[in-house]
Image: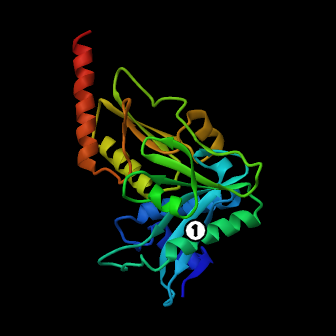
Amino acid sequence: MIKIIDLSSKYESLYASCLHGQNSANESLCNAKLQWYHRMKPKGITVKLALDDRGEAGGMIQYAPSEESFVLGKNLMILQCIWVLNEKKGRGNFQKKGMGKALLKAFEEDARQKNKDGIVVWGLSIPVFMRASWFKKQGYIVADKMGIQTLLWKKLNTEASPPEWMRQKKGPFINQNNVTVTCFKNGWCTEINRALSRAKEVVSEYEKDVKCEVVDTSEADVMRIWGISDALFIGSKEIPTGPAPEKKKIRKEINKAIKELHKKKENK
């Protein structure tokens, strides 16, 4: 029997590790995620967990008002993340037990109770995490697309307007004298936080030529100014953050950018 509960202090560390379990390797990321959660909870960020019949947490869902999210829309609720753990080792496999559907149902019911005009989800067109095809099977229809990312929704009010992806308005920091690594960090996703943390660690290895700029987008007005929630740029090139790139990949991209910078200086 699956039980859906609101996040409590008992499960906070597990939530912050995306249900994998906390360890020394990700302790700082977990702490940062929890700080973000407690700061954003008064603004409507909600987390629920799915427990199995043993009381083990195997699924989680996190959602927010559209006004506090990477989606443009009025009086909508946006699902930021839904995740059911599947580990061959560690805490085990909780998939194929109905946890995902139970969490999605709880999200929809909560949105109705809060008198939202619509509920919004996002998914990928490729068969990996957060598949758009799965949400379509649950009755969601496409509202907007951006690359491989699809925005889907359900109306709860006949007068509701469809949501749109927030799109980039300003570019990353560019400096002709060095390679600038720009980290846009909202804080809602541990995996993206891991990518940005690795980038900052790699930048610290360089004594010159490389500079790191961090933009805190946890405040909605800042996020709207840039049109960016979370992103990693090396110069003007955006580096995918899901899954988080390894340090050697980030280092390779920075070294490539340094060579291009030096070539430009030599040609002047």
Q: Secondary structure at mark 1?
A: helix
Q: Residue at x 38, y 64 (%)?
A: 26
Asked if residue 246 lies left or right of residue 91, the reply is: left
Way the structure is coloured: rainbow
In this view of the protein, which residue sits in the foreground, 186 or 79? 79
Q: Residue at x 47, y 62 (%)?
A: 134
Residue 219 visible in the displayed image: yes
Looking at the image, the residue that sits furthest to the bottom is 54
- Which quadrant of the structure image shows residue 62? bottom right
Amino acid bearing label 1: Leu
x, y (%) of residue 174?
Answer: 41, 25
x, y (%) of residue 258?
Answer: 25, 29
- Which quadrant of the structure image shows residue 251? top left
Asked if residue 125 lies left or right of residue 45, the reply is: left
The quadrant the C terminus occupies is top left
The quadrant the N terminus occupies is bottom right
Residue 13 visible in the displayed image: no
Q: Residue at x 32, y 41 (%)?
A: 203
Residue to which mark 1 is pinned = 104
Q: Residue at x 58, y 57 (%)?
A: 140
User: How many neighbours does mark 1 have within 10 angstroms: few (below 14), some (14-19), or many (20 or more)?
Assistant: some
Asked if residue 43 lies left or right of residue 194, the reply is: right
- Work out whether 12 lies above or below 172: below
Asked if residue 51 lies left or right of residue 194, the reply is: right
x, y (%) of residue 254?
Answer: 28, 36
In this view of the protein, which residue sits in the foreground, 4 or 98? 98
- Work out whether 224 lies above or below 189: above
x, y (%) of residue 175?
Answer: 39, 23
